[in-house]
Amino acid sequence: MRYYQICVGITFSILLFSSCVRSDNGSTPAINDSFVESEPEVLSIKDININGRWESKDNRLYPILEFKGKSTIVVETIMGSFASSYERDEEFLRVKTDKSDLLFEIVSEDSIIGSGFAKGVWIKEK
């Protein structure tokens, strides 16, 4: 019986010791990368696609802008809509009108800010 108790004690000690010592043979990664979140990719202002329909809640003169193609825009006004062209200069958009140009600044993928007669914020519809 005493021999049995010694064998059990030695076996228990070996198991306890081996569970405390880590053997890294390279088969398992030291850090689990699957839970590490990568930062979202931020687009440069010049890479933002402005094509689509933009709506403003605070500018009643030009409530809707619809950018089409490389330089075409349809502007909806309180008097109706008209087609025109625009030029893009880095983060700025200059829209041609019959009286003067409208200036907008691209601030993110889904918002532009106008100045002058076009003062306000436009949000891109999804």
Image (cartoon, rainbow, N blue to C red):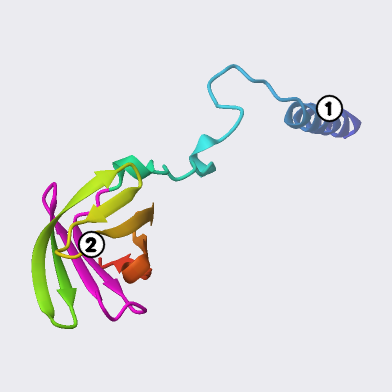
Q: What's the residue at 25%, 46% (across, down)?
A: 88
Say what amino acid the circle numbered 2 marks: Ser
Q: Is residue 72 left or right of residue 118?
A: left
Image position, residue 2 (x, y; %): 91, 32
Report which quarter residue 114 is drawn in. Answer: bottom left
Q: What's the residue at 49%, 40% (across, down)?
A: 34
Q: What's the residue at 10%, 74% (across, down)?
A: 81
Q: What's the residue at 37%, 44% (across, down)?
A: 45
Image position, residue 39 (x, y; %): 49, 43
The residue where tag 2 is placed is: 100
Residue 57 forms part of the magenta stretch: yes
Q: First in sequence: mark 1 or mark 2?
A: 1
Quadrant position of the C terminus in the picture: bottom left
Quadrant position of the N terminus in the picture: top right
Is residue 108 visible in the rendered structure shown here? Answer: no
Report which quarter residue 116 is drawn in. Answer: bottom left
> Magenta residues?
49-72
Image vertical order of residue 85 relative to residue 3, above or below: below
Image position, residue 113 (x, y; %): 38, 62
- Element class at badge 2: loop
The residue where tag 1 is placed is: 10
Image position, residue 46 (x, y; %): 32, 41
**Residue positioned most to the right:** 2
